[in-house]
């Protein structure tokens, strides 16, 4: 079963029942490879990507309208990277609607994480890629690098730093200017607005206490986001299962895929 759902006035959601997969970015999109996480005997899937009517809470409303349209009582909401931000935001708003929220590459969209991503961490962990990113930017304009994420080379940096070993296929995708510009623009829209959330909102105890258990995993090697993000989530939510794995940030890293497929998405 599949179809399209109008998302307010502008976009359409492509859907298939009945697992919600929230991709990274924001604006990163999905690929055919994402299907490996879901046993086709159990789950059926599909994806989606304008900055109008495009905030965290617009997306949360879209997800819930889709659940209502499909008549699904409860479902599993899986998110990696930006998806690990959006999934708990949905869970906070609709704690009655999910069975579980497996996450990977934890990202709670706090200023400390954005500073790490756009400057402190990336520049230290990935100096070669960082130099390529800042090279075309005049030195006097390098103050707020989050604003400059709209520079089309930013998606190249994101793809080059998301794996232990650089995936040439991902870099070739960045060469498609329309995709790279869209990714950079959408991500910039969310990050300069701090995800349209209060600082630390996803770690607030009251909504967390109403949510179902979460299974989460976070890379230890070459992470473009700080490991402390996963630690802070666990500290705010002691009931969750947290696994660290030696992998890059991408959910398609071999060790991350193994953990997600074998351990965390084995739902009957």
Image: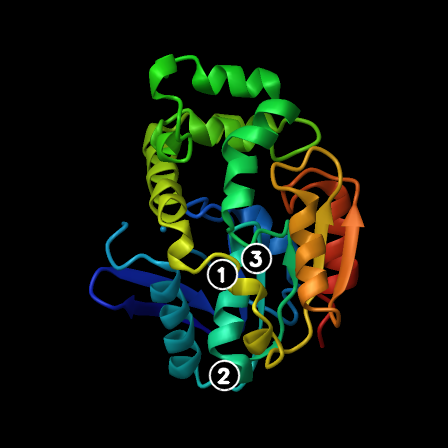
Determine whether, in the image, residue 58 is placed left or right of residue 223. Answer: left
**Crowd rating for badge 3 (residues with CA inside 10 Å; few <14, some 14–19, many 20+):** many
Of 224 and 78, the residue lying toward us = 224
Q: Please give left or right for residue 250 compared with residue 16 in the image.
A: right
Image quadrant assignment for residue 213:
bottom right
Q: Quadrant of residue 10?
A: bottom left
Residue density around tag 1, few if under 14, some if 14–19, many if 20 or more, within 10 Å: many
- Residue shown at 62%/79% (left/top)? 209
Which structural element holds mark 2?
A: loop
CB under 8 Å between discs 1 and 3:
yes
Image location of residue 85, percent across then percent down: 52, 57
Of the 4 image quadrants, the one containing the C terminus is: bottom right
Q: Is residue 115 above or below residue 21?
A: above
Residue 86 circle label: 1
State which mark lies toward you, 3 or 2: 3
Q: Name the residue nearer the viewer: 161 or 176.
A: 161
- Alpha-carbon span between mark 1 and mark 3: 6 Å
The residues bearing labels 1 and 2 have C-alpha atoms spaced at a distance of: 19 Å
Q: Residue under label 3, please give it.
A: 84
The picture places residue 120, in percent across and down from the top left corner, at 57, 30
Give the camera-side residue of 206 and 50: 206
- Residue denoted by label 2: 72
In the depicted view, which residue is nearer to us: 55 or 167?
55
Mark 2, Cα crowd under 10 Å, few <14 / some 14-19 / many 20+, is some
In the rendered structure, find residue 186 and report the number of the disc placed on it: none
Q: Earlier in the sequence, mark 1 or mark 2?
A: 2
């Amino acid at each position: 079963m599949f179809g399209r759902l109008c998302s307010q006035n502008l976009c359409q959601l492509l859907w298939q029942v009945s697992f919600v997969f929230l991709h990274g970015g924001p604006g990163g999109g999905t690929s055919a490879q994402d299907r490996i996480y879901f046993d086709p005997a159990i789950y059926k899937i599909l994806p989606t990507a304008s900055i109008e009517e495009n905030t965290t809470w617009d997306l949360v409303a879209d997800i819930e309208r889709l659940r209502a349209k499909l008549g699904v009582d409860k479902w599993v909401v899986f998110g990696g990277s930006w998806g690990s931000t959006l999934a708990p935001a949905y869970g906070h708003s609709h704690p009655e609607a999910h069975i579980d929220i497996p996450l990977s590459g934890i990202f709670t969209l706090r200023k400390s994480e954005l500073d790490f991503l756009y400057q402190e961490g990336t520049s230290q962990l990935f100096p070669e890629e960082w130099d390529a990113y800042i090279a075309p930017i005049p030195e006097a304009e390098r103050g707020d690098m989050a604003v400059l994420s709209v520079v089309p080379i930013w998606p190249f940096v994101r793809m080059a730093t998301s794996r232990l070993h650089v995936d040439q296929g991902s870099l070739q995708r960045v060469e498609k200017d329309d995709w790279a510009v869209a990714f950079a623009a959408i991500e910039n829209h969310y990050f300069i607005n701090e995800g349209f959330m209060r600082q630390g909102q996803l770690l607030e105890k009251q909504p967390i206490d109403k949510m179902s258990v979460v299974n989460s995993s976070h890379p230890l090697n070459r992470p473009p986001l700080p490991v402390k993000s996963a630690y802070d989530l666990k500290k705010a939510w002691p009931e969750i299962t947290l696994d660290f794995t030696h992998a890059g940030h991408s959910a398609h890293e071999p060790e991350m895929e193994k953990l997600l497929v074998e351990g965390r998405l084995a739902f009957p």
